[in-house]
Image (cartoon, grey):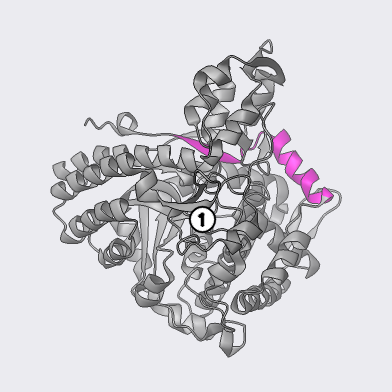
Amino acid sequence: MKPRHLILASALAALTAGCSGGSTTTEAETTTKTAQADTTSTDLQQKLSMYTNVRLTADLSGLSAKERQMIPLLIEAGDIMDKLFWYEAYGKQDSLLNALNDASAKQFVQINYGPWDRLNNNEPFIPGVGPKPDAANFYPHDMTKEEFEKANLEDKASQYTFLRRDANGQLITVPYHVQFKEEVKRASDLLRQAAGLADEPGLKKYLTLRADALLTDNYQPSDLAWMDMKNNRIDVVIGPIETYEDKLFGYKAAHEAYVLIKDMDWSKRLEKYAAFLPELQRGLPVPANYKKETPGTDSDLNAYDVVYYAGDCNAGSKTIAINLPNDEEVQLKKGTRRLQLKNAMQAKFDKIMVPIADELIADDQKKHITFDAFFANTMFHEVAHGLGIKNTINGKGTVREALKEQGSALEEGKADILGLYMITQLHKKGEVSGSLEDYYTTFMAGIFRSVRFGAASAHGKANMVRFNFFKDHGAFERDAQTGKYRVNYVKMGEAMDKLSELILTLQGNGDYAGVTKLLNEQGQIGAELQADLDRLSRKNIPVDVVFEQGVDVLGLNK
């Protein structure tokens, strides 16, 4: 294909400045200034090849007529969350897309919810655009951390407020439900319509309370109702939830939505594991002070087919398992619900994990790469978020508050390594079937998969810390001739315990400086590993997936 130059606004810098919410840039202003860019469609086609298309479908035959009517309503509400996340991640979506006349550029912008490549450390891929602001669009881009800390604003650290400037340039807070008044009213109405169709009492109550929460930013009642909901076949995770997008402090939650159909048979197989959490907590390889909290046992482990992604969870790398709610009070009182997105997980295993293992895992250990182990590693990652400690042991508040923007990466690292610890302990008790070698080898291949998400991703950085820690402790060896990796199962177990103790200690101490040092020193991709990852790219092994999804794909009509 002959390269075609992108025509776009030379005022893209003004576009990104408009993301702060403190100024506006009209379409006329941005389109009157144009310049030819040296990025070509060919370059962007190469970037698009990092993703492989997956048609997101599910078996709907077991749903009632009312449940089938609910799904389009929930998808429509999810579309609203998608628009809200665009604002939080970038700002003016239409201004950016209207400044581009190249189909590949528009497609890649839509995958990334902005002009920054989420799988390449948020590097800008549109000429004229600077680095992605750590503040995203949650804070004014000219605000310093010191100014934020000095501001006497009671709700400045709330997960559900924007920081903006008033007419005098002073910082103020704007609640989400005020900023998005019209949008959340529409989404709330859709959830109420869905609640009207729900026959299952728990689902009806949750949808009604979630509709209320969108209008008030008080999400705890609906989180508690969600935890009490047991017999529903349809589910939706919707609202401002994860704080990964806020890389300035890690305080602000971003909007997203998943529309889900529970796999009742698989869920039945998983429900027994929550009961082991208190016992596993007591056995953590860390001093007693760092495991004194008791995890809730009202936790659910369920398998779902996901039929719609929107917003934060759809940006760049796609989530394949969920552990919610994030509210520490709800976690200690009720536990959490762990949702395994089975159809999305299977797609990533088939299209990404197996090809990676063929390229990077020693030939005689490739037999240990199995979907059951991949499913279990992913599932126990989510379960492990409930282990450890939520509040620091030295009066620094919650771990989330103490570790600020560094907290997400360390928490993902904790969940990964404690997930493997859980499998090891349950395998010893005969509660997990299969060989331990399957779980360890698949875990190793999973590091290669996740580290490709880049250091800008909390999951990617966590995987790099673990890779380098494992390397330093002999958990694997790399054959210089073949470039393939062999797991040392004994040393991996030893490294697992040591890294678990390190992470839990850093969290319990609220050691912001120590976590920063760990992530900066160990969260980097070395030259040898980068060369191996480049091999995967040359083999055209995708990094992640993009979904064909919606009511048409599902064969549903509103």
- Image location of residue 265, percent across then percent down: 30, 58
For the C terminus, which image quadrant?
top left
For the N terminus, which image quadrant?
top right
Q: Is residue 69 left or right of residue 90?
A: left
Relative to 485, residue 542 above or below = above
Question: Is residue 539 rendered magenta in the image?
Answer: yes
Question: Is residue 335 rendered magenta in the image?
Answer: no
Residue carrying label 1 = 243
- Image location of residue 351, percent across then percent down: 55, 40
Q: Is residue 387 left or right of residue 195?
A: right
Classify mark 1: residues with Cα within 10 Å, few (<14), some (14-19) or many (20+): many
Magenta segment boundaries in residue numbering:
527-547
Give me the residue at 71% from left, 73% from top: 495
Give me the residue at 26% from left, 37% from top: 72
What residue type is disc 1 on?
A: Thr
**What SS does tag 1 mark?**
loop
Name the outermost residue toward the right.
Answer: 481
Name the outermost residue toward the front.
Answer: 168
- Is residue 86 visible to the viewer in this orientation of the structure? yes
Give me the residue at 56% from left, 82% from top: 395
Relative to 476, residue 495 above or below = below
Q: Nearer the viewer, residue 285 or 245?
A: 245
Relative to 161, residue 394 above or below = below
- Is residue 297 visible to the viewer in this orientation of the structure? no
